Image (cartoon, helix red, strand yellow):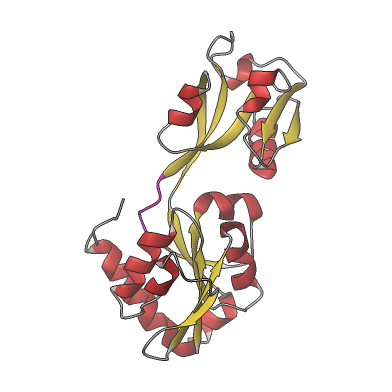
Amino acid sequence: MLTVALPKGELLKNSIRLLQSVGLDFSAFLDSGNRQLQITDASGTAKGLLVRGQDVPVYVEYGQAQIGIIGYDVLREKQPQVAHLVDLQFGYCRMSVAVKASSPYKSPLDLPAHSRVASKYVNSAREFFQGLDLPVEIVPLYGSVELGPITGMSEAIVDIVSTGRTLKENGLVEITTLYESTARLIAHPLSYRLNTGNLHQLVEQLREGVLSELPILT
């Protein structure tokens, strides 16, 4: 039986809609009264796992799920050993450097050497500043990273931005974008190579669904 790892949160609704377009129904995960973390599709051909977004590539990499849906930001940060198959073209956001709007910094290179940069995306932040040859201290934060500059703990943050509303409401502005992110279909490399559960056909159907511009839910 094919197992699909689905992310809790903002990507879930469109992930389920996309899978419904190829005959796999995991819509029970959207039921507010549902507490199950594993359900089987009515066809009996696939099983869905509802997991924290950061854990999707872990389940796929270790073979507990043959495919999964997760944002490129997570893949870029974690660098899991999975096959990247399809850009699903929903869940758009961007990884940005932001500072206080009142600060003198207009670009990352304006930051003083050895500044503190708060981020939950530690690897992405470190890679970016190393690429600039600018030595900074990366401060790991896993809550509201916007508080870093607000409290003076850090000069800047590296974080995911969607609409920019949270930054604006907290007096922060973006000064550069590291990369853009959308939801991606990933697979366990060996499962994909062996075509486990007729995986190739399913992937092609999903790719066709994306190309046919399946309506995105908001």
Instruction: Classify residue 94 as left or right of residue 61.
Output: left
Whether residue 104 appears in magenta in the rendering, the answer is no
The x and y percentages for residue 93 are: 44, 42
Q: Going 55% across and 73% down the picture, which residue do you hit?
A: 37
Q: Going 62% across and 71% down the picture, which residue do you hit?
A: 59
Q: Which of the 4 image quarters holds residue 107?
A: top right
Residue 2 shows up from this direction: yes
Residue 155 shows up from this direction: no
Whether residue 91 appears in magenta in the rendering, the answer is yes
- State the residue in front, 212 or 134: 212
Q: Main secondary structure of the magenta part?
A: loop
The x and y percentages for residue 64 are: 62, 79
The x and y percentages for residue 71 are: 49, 54
Instruction: Classify residue 214 as left or right of residue 118.
Output: left
The x and y percentages for residue 44 are: 42, 91
Q: Going 46% across and 23% down the picture, which residue do you hit?
A: 168
Q: How many numbered markers are drawn?
A: 0
Q: Going 67% across and 39% down the picture, which residue do you hit?
A: 127
Farthest residue, direction front: 33
- State the residue in front, 208 or 44: 44
Q: Is residue 27 above or below residue 214?
A: below
- State the residue in front, 70 or 108: 70
Q: Is residue 3 above or below residue 94?
A: below
Which residues are the magenta region? 87-92
Q: Is residue 71 above or below residue 202?
A: above
